[in-house]
Image (cartoon, grey):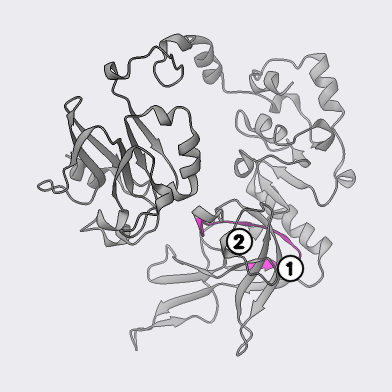
Amino acid sequence: MLNRIRVKGKLDVLCEADRNLLSQAITEPARCPTDALHIFATNKEVDAHNSATLGLLHTHIIDIHADDYRKDPRTGRMALQDRPFKGGKNELPDTLKVAEGARVMLTRNIDIQNGLVNGAFGKLLRVVYSENDQHIIKLGLKMDNETSGKNNRTPADNMVYIERAEENLKQKGVVRRQFPVKLAFACTIHKVQGMTTTSAVVSLKSIFEPGMAYVAVSRVTSLSGLYLLDMEEKKIFTNPEITAALENMRQANLDDMMPLLHVRQTLSRSEVFTIVHHNTEGLPAHINNIKSHHELCLADVLCLTETHLRGSFVAESLHLENYNLFKRNRHLSYTNFPQMANRSGGGVAVYVKSDIQVHEKQYIHNVTDLEFLALKVEAPVSALIAVVYRPPDYTLRPFLKNLS
């Protein structure tokens, strides 16, 4: 059924079997479990449900105001403001309304390698105050994913404690410190893409884009865990351009997809030089996946971006057997963009089979402010290999200028 509604056109009619199947999940809000994740199309609906559920389930509601700082013209120092400014919708919130025991979600990447990422769910179990002025300094979270924050947990209570994040507001000169969390009794459809859950309450009322209904309904692992509100068949539709593109795609023949997707025992490796590029989103966190991946292990040269490596030391666990490693970390890559150099993440690395003659071209005239590696291969082939990574916030104009 999910496969059929995934490609359903806006004017198509659900078949009787699919309509009957979905009808089993249609219900009313009053009959939905309060502890199930509620999925809506818009932020307005999510915010309304979160506020209502917080008041319904909790009596001791805590207001956490942002700490906003602005330069005092008399002293030249950053001074804490009496009350927070009005921030934008994508900025850290002016005020958080929470309660111990409430469902929450991280809204910023805190520790990517440790699973404390934007969109990670958990429960707020403890609010920590300073001893002097009763200012809230930490939040204790119990993460849903047992591996999230594993290296950050305190042995005494097995919780992850997070501090306030710091960001510059769009208002000139204002620096905000606030906890990067929000209530998560409900979430938008966009936020739950890729999530799997045993139960969810899904509202189709405000669907406004193709594919949204399919994404929302397919989050649950079984029909018994789906609670469907505001059922309208016309809200279930796909993008016709995507459907047309799929129909026009040429069918691939695995026998022709050499050497990565179909390995032949008779393949003569001397006739093939294989270069693979892969974005790791953290090499230390995914090195075991790389070591066991049947395709990546075929590479003569394995180019990796977003390695998240720091310092000059490379742990033994990051070495691949029969490969030599070349790397350049982010902080070494920028001269005129210190704000980029100081950020975590990024970085590039290249693994080269140990029997390949290669040397790194470390210093290239007039090349700076790029996260890159350049390798000259001498044998068994002659080649110049360059791997370059552009961070999402590195705008194209300066990037292309440096690249040229």
Residue at image x 84%, y 32%? 25
Locate residue 399, reporting x and y percent.
Answer: 25, 45
Residue type, label 2: Val
Q: Helix or strand or loop: what does disc 1 sit on?
A: loop
- Magenta stretch holds residue 100: yes
Q: Is residue 338 left or right of residue 376?
A: right
Give the labeled residue for mark 1: 99
The answer to whether residue 113 shows anywhere in this view is yes
Q: Quadrant of the N terminus?
A: top right
Mark 1 to mark 2 CA distance (whole Å) = 12 Å
Label 2, residues with CA under 10 Å away: few <14, some 14-19, many ≥20: many
Q: Helix or strand or loop: what does disc 2 sit on?
A: strand
Count of numbered marks: 2
Q: Residue 331 occupies which quadrant of the picture?
A: bottom left
Magenta residues, as a range? 96-111
Give the labeled residue for mark 2: 181
